[in-house]
Amino acid sequence: MAFKTEETGERFKNDSASTIQTYNTFGWWKTGAGDPCYGFGYHSQTGIVPSDSVKAGTKCAGAVGNVSDLGIMGLIQISQWEQDVSRKYSIETLPNNIDRRVLFDNTVIFAIITKNRVGNAAPDDCDDWPDDVVMLAAEKHHGSCEYNYGNGKAGNYCTEVLNLYKQYK
């Protein structure tokens, strides 16, 4: 929840069950059932909806502004590469279609890559991670703790995630 809130704010927190179901259904971006700008079905670095969406080419507000587009999308901001490399682990849970734009899929991908990124530092108790491991997971997910997106948003990603983790714990 800490990573989700850091990445995409309060989105979906108070939405109806039908809205959650829409964005938790594979292909919502292809059918037009949901809005890619609302459901984080756009590349967050450029703000552009990808070509496989009914709203392809649409520019969504709030783009980070980084010109090197890694195809980062979804609830916890997962790249295409992360989705692909986690597939050998996620196929057991999600044997058919998978996409980081689907809420549940995004969460499964994030959980898999986070556990792999922290390796042996991951605690046995999934409900109680030490501060240093939360910070390590944050740094590995974001690439560094300190950030300055050049759009007026700067800070320490790791500290922000840790503070949210403590709030939700």
Image: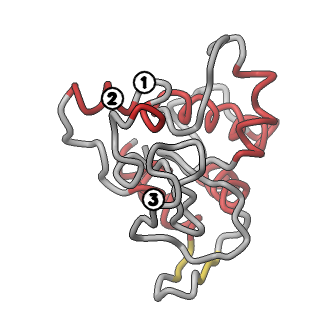
Identify the mark at residue 25; answer none if there is no mark: 1
Residue type (three-letter) at the residue carrying disc 2? Thr
Q: Residues within 10 Å of mark 3 (few under 14, many from 20)?
A: some
Identify the mark at residue 6; answer none if there is no mark: 3
**In the image, is residue 60 above or below residue 104?**
below
Which corner quadrant holds the C terminus?
top left
**In the image, is residue 70 above or below residue 52?**
below
Side (left or right) of 64 relative to 117: left
**Residue drawn at 45 percent across, 48 percent down:** 4
**Residue drawn at 58 percent across, 69 percent down:** 46
Count all numbered tags in the image, as a single digit.
Answer: 3
Disc 1 secondary structure class? loop
Give me the C-alpha separation between circle 3 and circle 2. 23 Å
Residue type (three-letter) at the residue carrying disc 1? Thr
Residue 88: percent from left, percent from top: 81, 22
Side (left or right) of 58 relative to 9: right
Q: Residues within 10 Å of mark 2 (few under 14, many from 20)?
A: some
Residue behind mark 2: 22
Residue 23: percent from left, percent from top: 38, 33
